[in-house]
C-alpha cells in the first residue's frame, strides 16, 4: 500500500488546534512510522466488491486490540454508529489482547463468510498470515491503529505514532525542566504502535535533551501489571523525575503507582487522553502527577474505518494510507480540551 499521507480536516471542523512542537514531522508529509512503498496484493478492492451495490447490507467483523480498554470500546462505538447509518451488521468479539484468540476470531469470520474485517492486530507479524488467508477467501480487510506485517490489506487507517512520541518528549522536557531521569514504559515488540511511540520519544530526547537520562522497562499486560512494574521501578530509581506511558493502560497504571507510593512530584506524560485521564487532570489541577496526554480520537478512527470500507465496496481507490490527526490534552489547559467524534 502506497505510504502517502491523506490529510483529514478533523481539527478544523472541531475548532481544536494543535500545539506546534520542536521535534517536527519529517519534511514532505512522510512519517518514520510508515514503511516505504507498500502495495496491496489485490488492489484497492476486489472485482466482486466493486460490482456489488455499495448500499447492499454488509456483515463486518471488527477486531479491536482489546475491548477491556476505553480505546477499543470507543473505536467500536465509532464503527457501530457509522455502520448503523449504512444498515450494516457489526460483529465484534473481544480479542482481549490475546493473539491466539484473535487468530481464532479471524478464522471464524472467514468461515462465517463476512464481507469485511476491520482489525487492529494484537501482534503485527503473527497475524499477517491470517489476514492473507482472509484476503484469499475474498474478505476485504481494513487494518487500523497497528500496521500488520503484510501489505495485502485493502486500506490502512493509522495515527502517526512516531510523531506522537516526539510530541510526548517535548511535553516531558517542559514538565521536568529539560533535565532529570525519565522512565519509558515499553511493551512487546509486536505492538507496533507502542514501538513507534517509544521510538519517537527516545529519539527526540536523545536529539534535543542531552541532560535527560532515560531508563526503559518492559511492561506487558493489564493496568494492574503496569502499576506493579512502575512500583518496582520507583523503588529501584528513587530519583525518577518523569514517566512516559505509551498507551491508556500504561498511563493509568503508572499514575496509580505514583499515587500509592506518594511520589507526587513525578510528572507523567501519557497517551490516549481517555475520559478517565481527563478526569484525573481536572481533579488534580496544574500541579498534578499527570502533566499531559497525547490525544487520539478513537470514535473518529472507527468512523473513518467504516467510511474507508465503504469506498472499497464502491470500487474507489484506497491505496493511500489514511492518517487520523492527534492532539494534546494538558493539565494546565484541560478545561478547553474537547473529544472529537
Image (cartoon, rainbow, N blue to C red):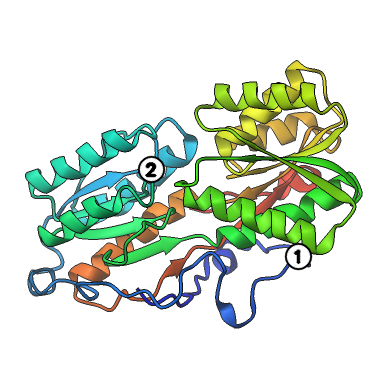
Looking at this view, is 217 or 278 the one in front? Answer: 217
Query: In which quarter of the view is residue 66 placed?
Result: top left
Q: Nearer the viewer, mark 1 or mark 2?
A: 2
Looking at this view, is 284 or 204 the one in front? Answer: 204
The residue located at (41%, 58%) in the rendering is 147
To which residue does mark 1 refer? Answer: 21
Q: Is residue 191 above or below residue 19?
A: above
Q: Earlier in the sequence, mark 1 or mark 2?
A: 1
Q: How many marks?
A: 2
User: Residue 119, percent across and down?
Assistant: 32, 50
To which residue does mark 2 refer? Answer: 122
Q: Secondary structure at mark 1?
A: loop
Looking at this view, is 209 or 189 the one in front? Answer: 189
The residue located at (57%, 42%) in the rendering is 247
Q: In the shown orientation, is residue 285 left or right of residue 148?
A: right
Q: Is residue 236 above or below residue 313?
A: above
Query: In which quarter of the view is residue 316 placed?
Result: bottom left
Q: In the shown orientation, is residue 107 left or right of residue 291?
A: left
Amino acid at each position: 500500500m502506497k505510504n502517502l499521507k491523506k490529510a483529514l480536516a478533523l481539527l478544523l471542523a472541531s475548532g481544536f488546534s494543535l500545539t506546534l512542537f520542536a521535534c517536527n514531522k519529517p519534511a514532505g508529509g512522510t512519517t518514520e512510522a510508515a514503511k516505504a512503498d507498500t502495495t496491496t496484493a489485490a488492489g484497492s478492492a476486489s472485482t466482486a466488491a466493486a460490482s456489488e451495490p455499495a448500499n447492499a447490507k454488509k456483515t463486518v467483523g471488527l477486531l479491536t486490540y482489546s475491548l477491556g480498554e476505553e480505546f477499543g470500546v470507543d473505536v467500536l462505538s465509532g464503527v457501530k454508529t457509522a455502520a448503523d447509518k449504512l444498515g450494516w451488521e457489526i460483529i465484534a468479539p473481544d480479542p482481549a489482547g490475546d493473539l491466539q484468540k484473535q487468530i481464532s476470531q479471524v478464522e471464524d469470520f472467514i468461515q462465517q463468510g463476512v464481507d469485511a474485517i476491520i482489525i487492529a492486530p494484537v501482534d503485527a507479524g503473527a497475524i499477517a498470515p491470517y489476514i492473507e488467508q482472509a484476503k484469499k477467501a475474498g474478505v476485504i480487510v481494513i487494518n487500523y491503529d497497528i500496521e500488520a506485517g503484510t501489505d495485502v490489506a485493502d486500506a490502512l487507517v493509522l495515527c502517526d505514532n512516531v510523531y506522537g512520541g516526539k510530541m510526548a518528549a517535548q511535553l516531558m522536557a517542559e514538565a521536568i525542566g529539560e533535565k532529570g531521569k525519565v522512565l519509558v514504559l515499553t511493551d512487546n515488540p509486536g505492538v507496533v504502535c507502542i514501538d513507534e511511540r517509544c521510538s519517537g520519544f527516545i529519539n527526540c530526547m536523545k536529539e534535543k535533551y542531552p541532560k535527560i537520562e532515560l531508563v526503559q522497562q518492559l511492561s506487558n499486560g493489564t493496568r494492574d501489571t503496569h502499576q506493579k512494574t512502575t512500583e518496582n521501578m520507583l523503588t529501584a530509581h528513587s530519583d525518577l523525575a518523569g514517566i512516559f506511558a505509551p498507551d491508556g493502560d500504561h498511563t493509568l497504571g503508572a499514575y496509580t503507582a505514583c499515587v500509592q507510593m506518594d511520589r507526587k512530584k513525578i510528572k507523567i506524560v501519557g497517551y490516549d487522553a481517555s475520559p478517565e485521564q481527563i478526569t484525573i487532570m481536572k481533579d488534580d489541577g496544574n500541579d498534578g502527577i499527570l502533566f499531559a496526554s497525547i490525544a487520539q480520537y478513537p470514535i473518529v478512527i472507527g468512523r473513518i474505518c467504516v467510511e474507508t470500507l465503504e469506498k472499497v465496496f464502491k470500487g474507489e481507490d484506497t491505496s493511500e494510507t489514511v492518517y487520523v490527526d492527534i492532539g494534546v490534552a494538558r493539565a494546565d489547559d484541560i478545561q478547553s480540551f474537547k473529544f472529537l467524534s
